[in-house]
Amino acid sequence: METFPFLNQLLQFLVTGLTVGAIYAMVAIGFNIIYNVTEIINLAQGEFVMLGGLVMVSVHTSLGLPLLLAFPVTVLVVTLVGVLLDRLAIRPIRKPSVMTLIIATVAASIIIKGLAMIIWGKSPYDLPAFSGRTPIDIGGVIIQPQYLWVIGFLVAVAVGLTLFFNRTILGKAMGACADNPDAARLVGINVRHMVLLSFALSAAIGAVAGLTLTPIALMDYDRGAMLAIKGFGAAILGGLGSFPGAILGGLILGLIESLSAGMLASGYKDAYALIILLAVLFIRPSGILGNLEVTRFKRF
């Protein structure tokens, strides 16, 4: 391996791209959970990721809670923020339209960002890596231990959601609301509770993405918007509403960014990703794994 520096460099870019893509994939999954139940594009999704990182910094570094305790506390706090978003910004709206609800999530995003700036300030925060920062050298390819945590959590989220939606009554109830909320209501499913659960799940996954990203790339109050854009792009690329598509889209975007930054020009990595996204959508407007059927807005 060491006699092929170009190959080592290429593999290094692939490792970095998969790690970044795993973060985008988790953000995209959060978008899809809410979209599948309500058809709302929650533009505050990036703020859940931001809060995951900053709350983890507070409870682990500032308060001194051990990692095993700080992790669930952080996820719980951000989950409660997701619940409050539904209760305070979504549910009070009468006769909601898709555009009205999207605007409500934009307003919530601005409020959350402002509160985060007041609480944590404008400085970026670091978080100790879960397994230290001693790199793993595999044939000249350097892998940070935190990369493995990021990819491992993506796998855990994917497996957990698959089991939840396929094997549990609650998961199947959420799926029924996504398919036909009126029919779900007729068989006794509380659609409003399923919407609340979708926001809670989405916030929890965003928190996991944020607290695993922070040891790698730092976190500040203003990171949420860009993460939301990348995650939404991944969801669109893979197919909005498709969980496998969210994972595939996130990994593809991460790889495009890493390879273009390393082998072409780092200043245009976002442009390259956007060009690929547009090219795919011209060929297949529903995304790579998306459904071509256009669904109507589901009232809840």
Image: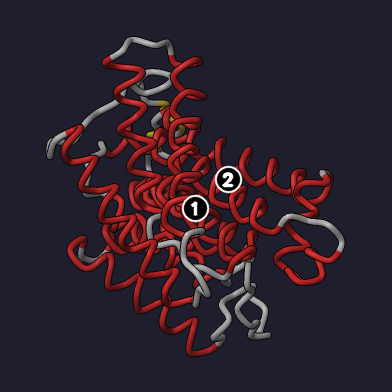
Residue 37 in sight here = yes
Numbered circle sitting on residue 86:
1
Q: Residue at x 56, y 77 (%)?
A: 287
Residue visible at 22% across and 68% down in the picture: 268
Residue at label 2?
Answer: 201
- Relative to 266, is 118 above or below? above
Marks 2 and 1: which is nearer the front?
1
User: Which quarter of the rendering shows the N terminus?
Assistant: top left
Amino acid bearing label 1: Asp
75 up-or-down from 230: above or below: above
Between the residue at mark 2 and the residue at mark 1, the CA separation in whole angstroms equals: 12 Å
Residue 283 image offset from top left, x and y in percent? 53, 89
Query: Which amino acid type is marked by label 2?
Result: Leu
Q: Give percent across and percent down for residue 201.
A: 58, 45
Residue 250 percent across, percent down from the top left: 48, 59
Residue 254 horizontal side relative to residue 199, left or right: left
Q: Nearer the viewer, residue 6 or 265?
A: 265
